[in-house]
Amino acid sequence: MMQPHFLPWHTEVARDWLGNKDRFAHAWLIHGLAGIGKREFAFAAAASLLCEAPLQGLACGQCPACGWIARGNHPDLKRIRPEAVAAEEGAELGAEEDGSASDEAIVEAGGSSKRAPSKDIRVEQIRSLEPWFNNATHRGGWRVALIYPAEALTTISGNTLLKVLEEPPPSTIFLLVADAPDRLLPTLLSRCRRLPLSTPSLDIAQQWLEGKGVKKANEWLAAAGGAPLLAQHQSESEQSPCPDWIIELLASLEQGRIPDLSNLADKLAKSSPKVWLDACQRLAIDLNLSAHGLACRYYPGQHKQLSAIGKHGGTLQFAQLATWLNEQKRVAGHPLNAKLFAQAVMQRLSQACQIKLSGYK
Ligand SMILES: [Zn+2]
């Protein structure tokens, strides 16, 4: 049983937002930094919209509607997400959700299919909603479609959704969730009201993480750019707040040695480019701060090495590196060859540091 809740740092904005339901827009884009709890917000919002006895606008957790939400089978709620995300959620919830992750996305994949789960929201998923839109809602209230991550909409599925939003079905609220709204179709964006969600203050985030039993909460939080759910996730799946490959890379660079690029690339190619490119960007920012003689922002545990590498040169090199990494992130979704791509990035990163190193050797 999983009753969705607003995270403490989002409760107030939720209350303000849901407290004004008379002129509620039919499509919302919920956006903000990755790992701050946008999906949790959207779920809790859906629960609050469907709750039959809300308390100050928020779900009561007691009524029949809240019960169905908790069991994942409210007929007026649909989750539209890529198969890959549905599979991840199924794995995270384990037996608890009792196979309810096998909803539309998985069913469409077909039991015998052996292909990798799709990372896109496919047009069939949007089209299959039509009968749902055309019937009256089961409980005579709202019906809520949660679409996440909205960046997973393709041009075709995005345009199909756009047509739906242009002539919205009655009593229906669409909640789209996105880290990067600039990657959505502008026409789709123009049909949504925006609800930006903020990142909690460091104090609140640290307190929350410590409450979850995370040790060195401040370091995990720094490495996650202040996003508490990302920090929690990384603390469960990684050995230390600073990724191993960064520790290895810095050890070589500090000694003026050329890092083992192939070995590093092998490690990186196993995870998503988006994840390790984020870490590269954080590293570039920390190197730049160190070059200015300032404290690191993301990897305070590596302060000594970073300042050794950073203080021996100008800052232009690191600023250029940050810009270059930003460009790579745009193409990172589908690199043709994950290892070659990782190796190219490691090489560029090392060059930025090596040039500085050669200056003081
Ligand atoms: Zn309720």
Image (spheres, grey):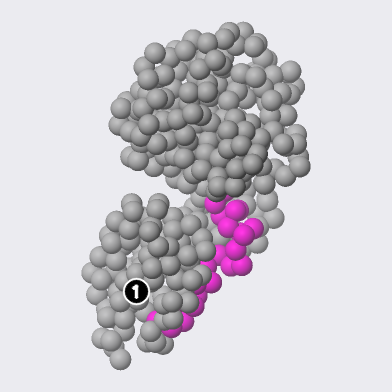
**Does residue 116 appear in the picture of this structure?**
yes
Is residue 301 in view?
no
Q: Kindly indicate the quadrant of the structure image that contains residue 61.
A: top right
Q: Identify the residue at horizontal 27%, vertical 60% (top origin).
A: 323
In the image, residue 232 lies in the stretch drawn in magenta: yes
Going by the numbered disc 1, the residue's amino acid type is Gln
Q: Quadrant of the C terminus?
A: bottom left
Q: Residue furthest front?
A: 112
Q: Which residue is mark 1?
A: 347
Residue 213's x, y, as percent? 69, 55
The spot of residue 114 in percent (x, y) is 59, 47
| x and y percentages locating residue 74 in the rendered image | 67, 22
Q: Magenta stretch: residue 339 in it?
A: no
Q: Which residue occupies the foreground of this view, 177 or 199?
A: 177
- Left or right: residue 306 versus residue 83 is left
Residue placed at 48% from the left, 57% from the top? 272
Graded by Cα atoms within 10 Å as few (under 14), some (14 to 19) or many (20 or more), the crowding at tag 1 reads some
| Above or below 100: residue 237 | below
The residue at the point 47 percent across, 36 percent down is 121
Q: In the picture provided, is 72 more to the left or to the right than 197?
A: right
Give the x, y percent position of residue 336: 38, 59
Q: Is residue 281 above or below residue 87?
A: below
The magenta stretch spans which residues?
Answer: 229-253
- Give whichever of 355, 89 is nearer the camera: 89
Point out the image quarter for the N terminus: top right
The secondary element bearing badge 1 is classed as helix
**Residue 228 to residue 49: above or below:** below
